[in-house]
Amino acid sequence: EELADAGYQFSSANSINIGRLVPQVVYYVYAYAKLLENEEIKAGEKINVTVPTGNFGNILAAYYAKQMGVPIAKLICASNENKVLFDFFKTGVYDKNREFILTSSPSMDILISSNLERLIYRIAGEDAKANAALMQSLTTEGRYEITPQMRQALQDFYGNYTSEAETAEVIRALYEKTGYVIDTHTAVAAGVYGKYKKDTGDVDTKTVIASTASPFKFTRSVMDAIDHKYDSMSDFELVDELSRIANVAVPQAIEEIRNAKVLHDTVCEVDEMPQVVKNFLKI
């Protein structure tokens, strides 16, 4: 109310904002169109989609694309060692009562996958009360279990996870085989796709792997996966070396950081944050 009275209105563009989620549907329409354009598939041919996910937003967009008519067969949900989604698809139980693990794919280090609620709503027959009851169970007990009928509605999904060691191996192996460098999150997806093929025998369906970050954002993890010899290099030395071995220019956003002036240096405790915000806004 105090901010509103001062004429300020705050909103969020995080991954549970539907305004951010809906445009992601375009990724999968575009990917299918490019496969057609490149004559990788025939019109109407089904593809698989593999998405590294923690908060379930990106793969939910692929699910929505499928509902809208994009010919998607399997939605392959890739987790890191925080494998709460893998366990959910395997058992029908969502249980956040577990150790939180810090990994080299931090955007997926999530134990409460907020966007999964939107999928639960669909498979619960778009029953808001049933959906709310499950989410309340998650809040109070840290877990919920869906019905056998709801599990049946998840047949289009496949879940698995890639360990830290496996993630590094995927990065190294792909680089040594092709010269192409991927980031840690994309490597999680690539690792899970490999497990999907072994588990199902489905090796022929054309599959899109969503690459969700630049390797330049996670340079040390990526370079360490390729060769431990890079451990001794500084951060910007690693950036330049990654550019060299991948034959890719350093992104301008990273170049600008090299000599950027420090503009913000405010540090505060959590309980001081409301007052710091007021100070910024001069209210």
Image (tube, helix red, strand yellow):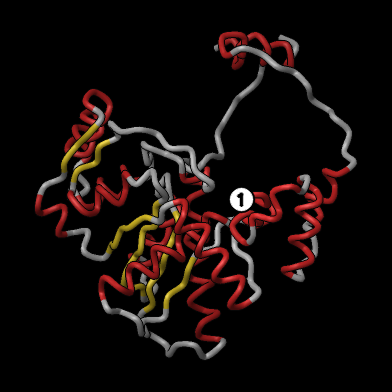
Q: Quadrant of residue 99?
A: top left
Residue at the image point whose x is 59% and y is 17% from the top: 4
Q: Residue pushed farthest left?
A: 148
Q: Quadrant of residue 206?
A: bottom left
- Can residue 217 be seen here? The reply is no
Residue 282 in the image: state x and y as whole percent. 75, 11
Residue 15 in the image: state x and y as whole percent. 49, 43
Q: Name the residue under label 1.
A: 221
Residue 23 in the image: state x and y as whole percent. 52, 56
| Closer-to-camera residue (244/45) | 244
Residue 160 in the image: above or below residue 104: below
- Can residue 2 be seen here? The reply is yes
Amino acid type, callout 1: Ser
Residue 131 in the image: state x and y as whole percent. 22, 39
Residue at the image point whose x is 21% and y is 64% from the top: 155
Residue at the image point whose x is 26% and y is 48% from the top: 87
Q: Is residue 16 left or right of residue 67?
A: right
Q: Is residue 32 left or right of residue 2?
A: left
Residue 41 in the image: above or below residue 220: below
Crowd class of label 1 (few under 14; some 14 to 19; many from 20; radius 10 Å): many
Residue at the image point whose x is 35% and y is 81% from the top: 203
Image quadrant in which the N terminus is located: top right
Residue 45 in the image: above or below residue 155: below
Q: Is residue 281 left or right of residue 151?
A: right
Image quadrant in which the C terminus is located: top right
Q: In terms of secondary structure, where does tag 1 sit?
A: helix
Q: Is residue 225 left or right of residue 36?
A: right
| Closer-to-camera residue (70/152) | 152
| Closer-to-camera residue (1/54) | 54
